[in-house]
Amino acid sequence: MEERRITVTVNGEPRTVEIEPRLLLAHLLRQGLGLTGTHIGCDTTNCGACTVLYDGRPVKSCTMLAVQADGHEVTTVEGLGTPSELDPVQEGFTTEHGLQCGFCTPGMMMAAKALITENPNPTEEDVRWGLSGNLCRCTGYQNIVKAVLWAAEKQRAASAAASTDVTV
Amino acid sequence: MYPSRFRYEAPRSLGEAFALLAEHGDEAKVLAGGQSLIPLVKLRFAAPAMLVDINGIPELAYHREDADGSLRIGALCRHADLERSPLLPGNHPTMAAAAPLVADPIVRTRGTLVGSLCHADPQGDWASVMLALNGEIIAQGPNGRRTIPAVDFVVGPFQNALHPGEIAVEARVPAARGTVSGSYLKLERRVGDFATAGVAVAIESVGGQVIRAGIGLTGVGAGNIKAVEAEQSLVGYTLDPDVIARAAELAAGAARPKTDHRGSAEYKRHVVATFVRRALSGYRAPVAA
């Protein structure tokens, strides 16, 4: 079957691969590129564990073809922060114990990142609404919501500090 | 879970897309948001030989209000675009209420209104909204465009009225007259589930008197239902409690629900009546901003 060459910018780095058109984006990330932080939970577009950012917006990577990412930017949980410099969302999930088994966590964090980027000052209701496409089967939503609110506050503080720096 | 093999093309213009569809006929499927089609091909409920991905045709990514107040929604307008649109809340309350209730927030990033109509899932939300608003679908093919009323667009479960070689390029909501009100109310067990029952209501009134009423029902029949008798019962009246109660009863009577894991037929009928009453009484579902 015809393979095609695509170039996807994954976590800031252009990656050129040859794939079949039927390959799902989630499988390209996991098997093709070894980025196993993106989890596949349900495979039926329900659970959101495979959420990544596609040109900055959250998508379920099990419900997109990899070929559709040709020429686009994808951010996975591996691109969120580094062990020495965690993203506020990652810090929030750590600080507020926003996970139990951790399976849904990468998708939760990517959805949360998109949410607080669009709405830096969300209410608890906004967070619950914004994460309603991501399922946690440990019933851990309470701490996930707290983690995202923590992250939003941290991000606001960081951007306030950054703008102060600029004016000084 | 891999889909079976297919050819894939991503045309950069409608002309290229029509040429591909003409070449491949019934074997080709149009891929827009993909939030229904990709699950179908993954589960191998569908196995098209060719996918024509229209995401690279930027001229389809729009929604706008014409000077006369009618609303045009291009084939690549995502649910999320409508959810965030400043155009909807004032003049298009039924659309504004429905947009945040379709699927879940992540699916709404990709999924499109026009694609959802084409998919013609009997449980889809937008078809009820379009039935209530007397919407239309613009089908375009190599030989030009034609307008298909929403009420004629769905011809059966997962079957639409498009001819081979045509693309649904736009959905259109005609301009309302007078004062507009309405809503979309949906009962779902959890976000992303299909509706246990959903009701779209669109009212146009002058001086408090209803001049046009639209009522569409989701999840309570073999397809979306336009509750015509309930609609007609409102025209010429003011929305007082007796008039509302009669319309609610007629809409519940138009529903053809089945007892299933989402509830009994009787329960679903009751929900339809309750939602019609609430929508006509100006109740708005609580929705996060």
Image (cartoon, rainbow, N blue to C red):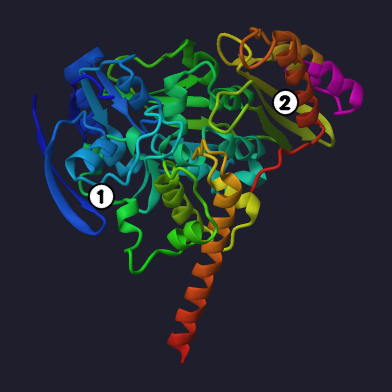
Task: Name which quarter of the figure residue A22 lies in.
Answer: top left
Of residues B134 and B30, the one drawn nearer to the viewer in this rendering: B30
Going by the image, does B146 lie left or right of B245?
left
Which chain is indicated by disc 2?
B
Q: Quadrant of the N terminus of chain A?
A: top left
User: Which residue is found at the position 56% from the left and 8% from the top?
Assistant: B222
Q: Where is residue B201 drawn, in percent x and y?
A: 69, 27
User: Which residue is found at the position 25% from the left and 47% from the top?
Assistant: A35
Which chain is indicated by disc 1?
A
Going by the image, does B137 lie left or right of B211?
left
Going by the image, does A110 lie left or right of A120?
left
Amino acid type at mark 2:
Arg
Q: Where is residue A93 drawn, in percent x and y?
A: 49, 56
Amino acid type at mark 1:
His
Q: Is residue B234 magenta?
A: yes
Label 2: element kind: strand
Secondary structure mostly seen in the magenta stretch: helix
Question: Which residue, given by chain and number where applicable, does mark 2 sit on?
Answer: B212
* Residue found at the far front of this picture: A101
Distance of label 1 from label 2 (alpha carbons): 46 Å
Q: Which mark is residue A72?
A: 1
Residue B102 drawn above or below residue B164: below
Q: Is residue B29 magenta?
A: no
Question: In the image, which is nearer the foreground, mark 1 or mark 2?
Answer: 1
Of residues B20 and B106, the one drawn nearer to the viewer in this rendering: B106
Task: Name which quarter of the figure residue B46 lies in.
Answer: top left
Residue range highlighted in magenta: B231-248
User: Which residue is found at the position 33% from the left and 64% from the top?
Assistant: A83
Question: For mark 1, does the 10 Å Cα neighbourhood hold few (<14), some (14 to 19), or many (20 or more) residues?
Answer: some
Q: Where is residue A4 drawn, in percent x and y?
A: 10, 36
Labels 1 and 2 within one chain = no
Examine the rendering and report whether any part of residue B136 can be seen: yes
